[in-house]
Amino acid sequence: MIPNLPTDNLYKFSFVGCLFLIGLTAYLTGRYQSDLLASYDKYKLESIALDYQYEELLEEYQMIDEKVAIDSTLLNGKEVLDFRKKRNLFKRTQANLNARIDIAQEKLDYFACKILPSASLFAFILFLLAIYSCYLWYIRLQYYQDEILKSELTKP
């Protein structure tokens, strides 16, 4: 007499569940990485644009400096104050962007050092569980079903 066998649905569910979790892990880590890279690239591009604006500001300063060199009476105190305000604003904005870039870089490093290896290990363990589920399905169910079919085919 054949003992009560578990249904193959249990093993199929285990296998499919593991494959689903592997796919979900891959999707979420990829999505998180792409979000981090997008924010890093965004801050880097803003920083580059700000560098160009700062260069334009320095050109403006050189023009003011040339005016003063030609005739010091042409120097308008308001122009110098505007320049200093703009320069300070650019320096603060650049410092803020550099801080954001550093934070984004730290997040990328943390992702590469901690999250990605953990997710890879998790996916590998799930893969092993999926293989084990297939093995159990074959040993506990499919083997006996194959034997039953063989015996039915050999009956006259």
Image (cartoon, rainbow, N blue to C red):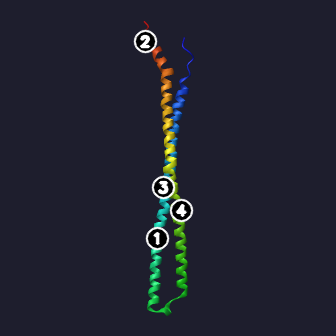
**In the rendered image, which residue does mark 1 sit on?**
51
Q: Label 2: few (<14), some or many (≥20) within 10 Å?
A: few
Does the CB distance between marks 4 and 2 fall below 8 Å? Answer: no
- The residue depicted at 52 percent of the width and 40 percent of the height is 122
Give amino acid for label 2: Leu
Residue found at the far front of this picture = 113
Q: CA gap, disc 4 to disc 3?
A: 13 Å
Say whether disc 2 or disc 3 marks the residue closer to the N-terminus. 3
Q: CA gap, disc 2 to disc 1?
A: 81 Å
**In the rendered image, which residue does mark 2 sit on?**
153
Q: CA gap, disc 2 to disc 3?
A: 61 Å
Give amino acid for label 1: Asp
Q: Nearer the viewer, residue 117 or 69?
A: 117
Does the CB distance between marks 2 and 1 fall below 8 Å? Answer: no
Q: Secondary structure at mark 4?
A: helix
Say whether disc 4 or disc 1 marks the residue closer to the N-terminus. 1
Residue 100 is tagged as 4
- The residue depicted at 51 percent of the width and 28 percent of the height is 133
Q: Secondary structure at mark 2?
A: helix
**In the rendered image, which residue does mark 3 sit on?**
37
